[in-house]
Image: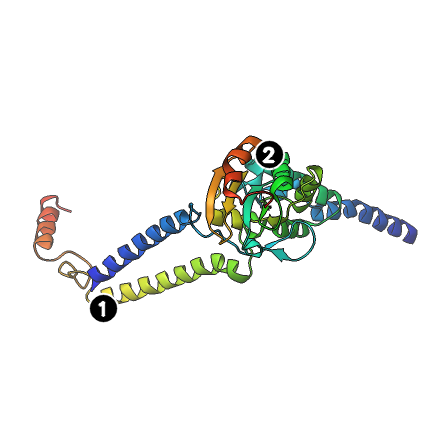
Amino acid sequence: MRARLVLLALVALAALAPAAAAEQRASLTEIEKQVMCPVCGTLLQLAESPQAQREKAFIRRLIAEGRSESQIKDALVAEYGDAVLALPQGSGFSLSAYVVPIVAFILAAIALAIGVMRWRRAGGGDGETDTPDGGPSGEDADRLDADLARYDL
Amino acid sequence: MRSSIAVLAVLAVVGLLVFGLVSKGSSGVALGDPAPAGPLPRLEGDGDGSLAEYKGKWVLVNFWASWCVPCKEEAPALEKFQQQHGGPRFTVLGIDTRDLTDDGREFARRYGLSYPQLRDGDGGAAHDFGTTGVPENYLVDPTGKVQWLLRGPVDEQYLHDEVAPFLPEGKS
């Protein structure tokens, strides 16, 4: 029984190991979506220029050497600079690409909230049609009463 | 108050658009302008090099890349011109732009390029010069100003007719 359990565990491990390795292994298709062709100014995935072909060959070579996705992207940055990355890096000055929109959104939300508060404090419009129970007033109320009486509602 | 804020917002947006347009079109050199001379890594060996090192010489700055077919065609002509005119008063200076280091080195070896080579991996120098592609050639005088430029490949005849007349008599 014990031996059978050990055997089962080994089989399960053997089945899981390739899947885990496949997850970590870099692929050209995935990297192509994340890096640019510096000469074409488009994603490498969409580029077919001679420079793009050399860049793809470079990535294939590094994959064959067993490099991880992040190592390959680092190597591309070393060759072509930060601009080769389709998305800015989350550090240094590039971090501002992520931080600035968030800060701008928060500032806009605060400005909007302050604006709404001021507007409500100032009366929130002309206020002429508001009644304590939320119904119409003045001429509207008279017309409503007349309509209700006419249709006997 | 509200209208002044709106005007300010509109002005800010317009200002940003103008800045974007101006900064996009501001790169590049014209004849008579000082040539950008920032440091760049050497293609072979360690450390940086720069156009500023050649002050006092005429320099033919050649932007190229290993993946560029016309660059392959002009490389022998540039090497021959360097053999004929290279010396204390003139040199060709190659700048390998937006290229892989190994590919660039292999290119220089294959064509036996003996003149100095720098690497411009991110294309920053090419942008500063205002190149529109590769190859492009800029003749820089001993004071560091651009005296001639050609967007496209050169050949022996062109170098002889258009560049050589700028250079001092004899082997420069």
Give the residue number, with chain letter if any, for mark 2.
B74
Q: Foreground: B160 or B169?
A: B169
- CA separation in Å, label 2 and label 1: 75 Å
Q: Amino acid at mark 2?
A: Glu
Task: Write down the chain letter for disc 2.
Answer: B
Q: Foreground: B142 or B148?
A: B142
Task: Write down the chain letter for disc 1.
Answer: A
Q: Is residue A124 above or below residue B117?
A: below
Q: Secondary structure at mark 2?
A: helix
Q: Are marks 2 and 1 in contact (CB under 8 Å)?
A: no
Give the residue number, with chain letter if any, for mark 1.
A121
Q: Residue B50: x percent and y percent?
A: 57, 55
Q: Secondary structure at mark 1?
A: helix
The residue lying at 62 percent from left, 36 percent from top is: B75
Q: Foreground: A38 or A129?
A: A38
Snapshot quadrant of residue A133: bottom left
The residue lying at 55 percent from left, 45 percent from top is: B61
Q: Amino acid at mark 1?
A: Arg
Q: Residue B117: x percent and y percent?
A: 63, 47
Looking at the rendered structure, whether the residues under marks 2 and 1 are on a common chain is answered as no
Q: How many marks?
A: 2
